Structures are given as C-alpha cells and as structure tokens.
C-alpha cells in the first residue's frame, strides 16, 4: 500500500475508534428496530432485565425509564405497547393531527407531509454510499429506521477501513456519515422526540425518545472528536440530489441494500 494512504493515528487511537464504531453500529441497529417494528414478547423480557450503565447519559436515562415501566409488566403489556406504537408512529386512530411519524419529511417540510425533499436527500446519501432499499420496499426512504441502519453500515465501513489501514476510505466513510448525521438526523430528531413525549401514553416509548436524544448527543460528540483526529475541517457539506443545483456530482449506482 502507498505509505501516504496509511492512517496517521497510533494504535490506541485506532482501537478506540474501532470500539466506538462497533458500539455505534450495534446501537443504531437496536434503535432502528424500535422504530420499525412492534415489540415481541422476547424483546419485552430482554428489556426488563437489561443492565443499566448508570453513567447519567440520556441513553442511560431512557433505558432506566423503560426498565421501570416493564417492572410492572403483565399479560397485557405487549398489547398495550403495540397500541401505543400504532398510535404514535403509525397514526392509528388519529384523523385530525400528526402525532410522531418517524419520517424526516414530516418534520422538515412546510406541508408536514411524506415524500418531500428529505426523502430525496436520504436516497441520494444511500446511493452515494452504494446502497439502496429493496425493490419491493413500500415505506418512504426517510423513515428513521432506515436512516439508522444506514448510519450503522457506514460505521461498519469505517472499521473496514481501519482494519485495512486505508486513510482515504476511512475519511470517505466518516465524512459521509458525518454529513448524513448533520443534514438528515440532527436537524429533526429533537422535534420527533418532543412529539413522542407529547403523544406517547407509555413510559416505554417516552424512554425510546430519551434514548434517541442520547443518540443525537453521542453522535455529535463522536463526529466532533473524529473530525478533529482526521483533520476533516469544521464545514459539513450537504450532498444534494443530482437535479439540485447544489449537487456535488452524481451518486454512485446502488449496490446492496440499507435494509433486508
């Protein structure tokens, strides 16, 4: 390998970044599942016995609220949570107002409706990363679950670059992930969390909202630290769709899938 393309970090820093990426990827996939699907009985039992770190972070506070709620679980808890999930995230039973649908377009468009610019923007990032959703997908691509799965893929990709001592691939993966976070997560997730707090009827989903706040906080801190370590600069450019005049080139062709 060209020596100029090797990662200019010491072994301890590389290992720390690798462990952080592993943790980030796992948490992204975990959080994505909570927004994409109703809970199973097995998940409810696992949550009831989850270990709390006790570090005072928003993620820790959210898990604590969830565990306390499930301390009082009973035979109808799964149904209670399914009803709350459907109300809050699917709008079941609501005809005159938006609750907390986990779609970026709803929180960033003037009309507060689906399939707006945010959806197109998310797809542009997925394709820039060589990914796409399955051809039979019918859910708008700016669903938070898909966005979190994409973030997990990019964390995995950063670790592949670390393992290969490839500075260019590492910078590409981190830069894409950082830009996606700033322009497609940090910009709307606080509003989603406020909506969940307002409309959720169970402390479980209010706990999920608190964990999501913790995700935003931890990702912001991670990217600040890694951007400094890799000398990526303070500016975080947005990648726009090809038909937008602000676009930086044409996204790569889709290879693989964000979700399966």
Image (spheres, rainbow, N blue to C red):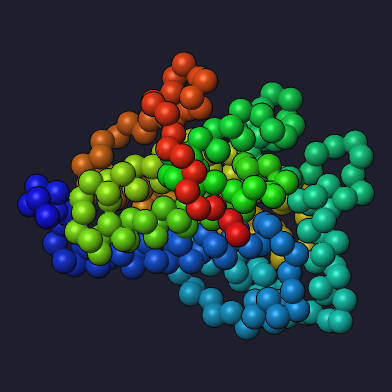
Say whether residue 235 is left or right of residue 198: left
For the point 52% across and 59% down, the residue is 28
Q: Residue at 92% of width from left, 39% of height from top?
A: 95
Nearest the eye: 133 or 53: 133
Rendered residue at 39%/66% (across/down): 22
Residue 148 visible (yes or no): no
Query: In this rendering, would 173 be left or right of 51?
Result: left
* Percent x, y of residue 248: 39, 25
In the figure, is residue 78 to the left or right of 70? right
Above or below: residue 172 compared with residue 246: below
Q: Position of residue 218 (x, y in %)?
A: 44, 55
The quadrant of the image that shows the N terminus is bottom left
Relative vertical location of residue 220 with respect to residue 159 in this rendering, above or below: above
Side (left or right) of 93 relative to 121: right
Locate residue 203: give its quadrant: bottom right
Q: Nearer the viewer, residue 67 or 92?
A: 92
Front residue of 55/246: it is: 246
Q: Position of residue 124 (x, y in %)?
A: 51, 35
Quarter in which the C terminus is drawn = bottom right
Give the vertical position of 130 relative to 113 (above or below). below
Q: State the residue lying farthest toward the left.
A: 3
Is residue 101 placed above or below 76 in the rendered structure?
above
Total numbered labels: 0
Query: What residue appears at the point 59 percent right and 32 percent down from the top-left corner?
Result: 120
Q: Position of residue 58 (x, y in %)?
A: 53, 59
Taking the image as drawn, is residue 55 in sight?
A: yes
Residue at the farthest top position:
245
């Amino acid at each position: 390998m060209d020596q100029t393309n090797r990662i200019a970090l010491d072994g301890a820093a590389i290992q720390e970044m690798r462990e952080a990426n592993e943790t980030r990827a796992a948490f992204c996939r975990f959080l994505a599942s909570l927004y994409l699907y109703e809970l199973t009985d097995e998940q409810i039992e696992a949550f009831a016995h989850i270990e709390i770190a006790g570090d005072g972070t928003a993620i820790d506070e959210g898990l604590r609220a969830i565990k306390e709620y499930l301390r009082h679980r009973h035979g109808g808890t799964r149904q209670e949570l399914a009803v709350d999930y459907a109300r809050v995230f699917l709008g079941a039973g609501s005809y005159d107002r938006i609750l907390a649908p986990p779609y970026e377009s709803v929180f960033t468009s003037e009309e507060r409706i689906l399939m707006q610019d945010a959806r197109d923007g998310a797809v542009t990032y997925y394709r820039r990363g060589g990914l796409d959703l399955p051809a039979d997908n019918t859910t708008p691509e700016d669903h938070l679950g898909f966005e979190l799965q994409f973030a997990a893929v990019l964390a995995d990709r950063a670790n592949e670059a670390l393992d290969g001592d490839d500075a260019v691939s590492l910078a590409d993966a981190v830069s894409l992930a950082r830009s996606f976070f700033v322009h497609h997560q940090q910009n709307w997730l606080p509003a989603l969390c406020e909506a969940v707090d307002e409309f959720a009827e169970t402390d479980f989903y209010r706990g999920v909202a608190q964990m999501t706040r913790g995700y935003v906080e931890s990702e912001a801190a991670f990217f600040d630290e890694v951007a400094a370590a890799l000398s990526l600069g303070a500016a975080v450019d947005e990648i726009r769709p090809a038909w937008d005049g602000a676009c930086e080139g044409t996204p790569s062709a889709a290879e693989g899938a964000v979700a399966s």
